[in-house]
Amino acid sequence: MKKWSIPVLIAIVALLMPMSMINVSAQEEASLSISKSADPTSASVGDTITYTYTITNTDNVTIENITLEDDPLGTIDLGGQTSLDSGATITATATYTVAETDLPGPLVNTAEVSGTDPDGNLFTDTGTATVELSYNTELQINKEADRETASPHEVITYTYTITNTGDIAIDNITLEDDKLGPITLNGNDNMALAPGQTITANATYTVSIWDFLRGKSIVNTANVTGTDGLGNSLTGSDTATVSLTIISKTLLTKFEILKLSGVPGKGIEKAPGLQKPFNPKSQAAEHAGKKDKDQEEEQLQIRERVENQGAEEQLQIMSEVQNQAGSEQATQDDDDEEANPGKGQLKKNSVTDNQTQGQEATQDNGQNKPDKDKPNNKSKAGK
């Protein structure tokens, strides 16, 4: 083959090549590039991120119709500049505020620049920036009582303050007090709180005598629970303490005084007579449930004196004892009857028996007198 034939063949092949292949070569020769950066590179919900875009024409021809699109931000304003000469650069910025929907992150977004050369060939390039996201979820509760000390039958009002101190919303919030049970929040069992939002609730408790029997103070804890937007469970708790004191015993009932005094007995809290207000002069708490040894010794002494004396002196002793006991035991008998029903009746029966025995002793004594003390019937009959 002759040397001139090779160039001719190349020229023929070039004429026969499709126009699309020529455009591809043009795109490969031209160059439009973009770089994208973010500041800061880590952020939380509510923080603002500033993106910087740098577009450069590294080709030897002018590129026109330049546009920039960011996938979360949309079209980015290039300041009216839509063309780049060879080697020229365009810089643009845009801002973005991190939303709760961006969690858990990272936040990755891409920008795409496009433009055409004088022959209408299209050039594109993309740039990506990544921002790590962090977030805080916390549910706090503060519980307070409206008094530091309380007595039986007084009412304690508890105030619960629940706050979302985190970065994202918390829902399905429930509140429960270990002493009072579930606490309703704004009429709903479940509540939602936005970041920084607060809700309050109240509940009351009436102090009882049983609280005193359990300890010197009422200590109860409130627990709050919730779920954040990512499905994480959150909890918080707080405790309130109220000291117990008895301001006045007159505010208590009889059975409450007996219980506080350690008096044993089943069902005394239901006894009708013990539901009355406490009488400060009562000695029921001192005598209830105890054996009256003093009275037993006194009765023994009485019996010994009676056995050793005549009938008249027996009656005198009985009378003295009864008069003395009557003044001392009048109040005590009522109190003993409250604490030990039936005991007063036994005492009354005992006194009656003693009186009967005294009268019988007098009658027997009169019947056993010697005959010299009796009238002389025979003398009267002989007259």
Image (cartoon, rainbow, N blue to C red):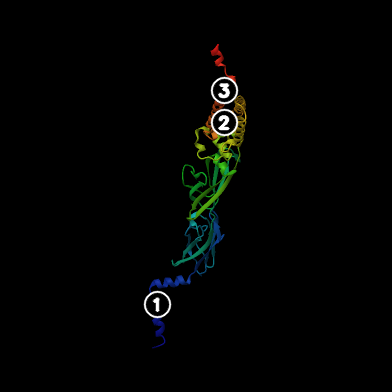
Callout 1 amino acid: Ala
- Residue 248 falls left or right of residue 108: right
Q: In this view, does 197 lie above or below 68?
A: above
Q: Residue furthest bottom?
A: 1
Q: How many residues crowd mark 1 within 10 Å: few (<14), some (14–19), many (20+)? A: few
**Which residue is the site of mark 2?**
333
Tag 3 residue? 366
Image point (53%, 59%), residue name: 133
Pick whichever, 120 or 264, lies toward us. Answer: 264
Of the image marks 2 and 3, the number of the one nearer the N terminus = 2
Disc 1 element: helix
Q: In which quarter of the image is residue 281?
A: top right
> Label 3 amino acid?
Gly
Q: Which of 60 and 236 is in front in this view?
A: 236
Q: Which of marks 1 and 3 is nearer the N terminus?
A: 1
- The image's mark for residue 14 is 1
Residue 10 at x, y percent in the picture: 40, 80
**Residue located farthest toward the front when viewing the structure as drawn:** 382
Q: Is residue 248 visible?
A: no
Q: Nearer the viewer, residue 337 or 281?
A: 337
